[in-house]
Amino acid sequence: ADLPDNPRQRSCPEELQQYFPKLYKLESIECYDISNISGKLATGSMVTFVNGRPDKNLYRKFRIKYVHKPNDFEMLKEILTRRLKHEEWKLPDMIIIDGGRPQLMALQKGLYNFRLKIPMIALAKRYEEIVVPVAANFMKLRLTENSPALHLVKRIRDEAHRFAHAYHIHLRLKNLLRQS
């Protein structure tokens, strides 16, 4: 599932190339996820994979500050907006989000405010479908089970989920201890 070590071979996977023809290299991928229970102590995560491998020095966790009810779309927009305000953080070649079309639409709105055109996809858990923006619509792709691209995207999504959930559990325990 790792990308090849030869820089000239680090390109967008074939399955995605037709949707992102200007994406020649795919070295840095960021993935975002949200974790909360009924909107309480909500957290978000950003994990970064470089050349197909996690770079934990680039991981970021976010405590949701501005959305106080269960709304994953607004929470995703919040963490993306907060992330993009850090101009010192290098922009990724692609963004992946855990979710489907609605989550992807929320992040596209966030990117639009910054006038950025970073390729984005979503990975919906139900059928492990990749959701890709196509013009003003969205297309669902079902890659084969043995697709290296699907394995990489799932690995990145699962890591973002793990990281967001771990931070959420940490905050819940901290809150519980404070109450006792």
Image (spheres, rainbow, N blue to C red):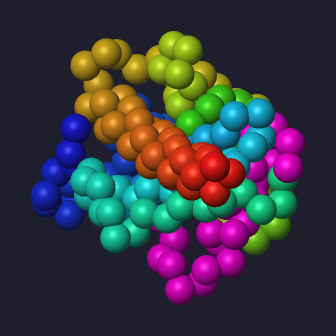
Q: At which x and y percent is residue 39?
A: 77, 40
User: What span is in magenta?
Assistant: 68-93
Which residue does the image show at 67% across and 39% down from the upper left? 36
Quadrant in which residue 37 is drawn? top right
78 horizontally vs 154: left or right: right
**Residue 22 visible from this viewpoint:** no
Query: Height in image: 160 above or below 87?
Result: above
The quarter of the rendered structure image containing the N terminus is top left
Query: Height in image: 90 above or below 151?
Result: below
Which residue does the image show at 62% across and 32% down from the upper left? 99
Q: Was residue 70 drawn as part of the magenta stretch in this picture? A: yes
Residue 25 versus residue 63: which sits nearer the camera? 63
Q: At which x and y percent is residue 64?
A: 72, 57
Q: At which x and y percent is residue 118?
A: 59, 60
Residue 114 versus residue 167: which sits nearer the camera? 167
Which residue does the image show at 51% across and 79% down from the upper left? 89
Q: Was residue 13 drawn as part of the magenta stretch in this picture? A: no
Query: Height in image: 82 above or below 123?
Result: below
Q: At which x and y percent is residue 57?
A: 34, 70
Which residue does the image show at 85% across and 49% down from the upper left? 68
119 horizontally vs 47: left or right: right
Residue located farthest toward the bottom when viewing the structure as drawn: 88
Residue located farthest toward the left when viewing the structure as drawn: 5
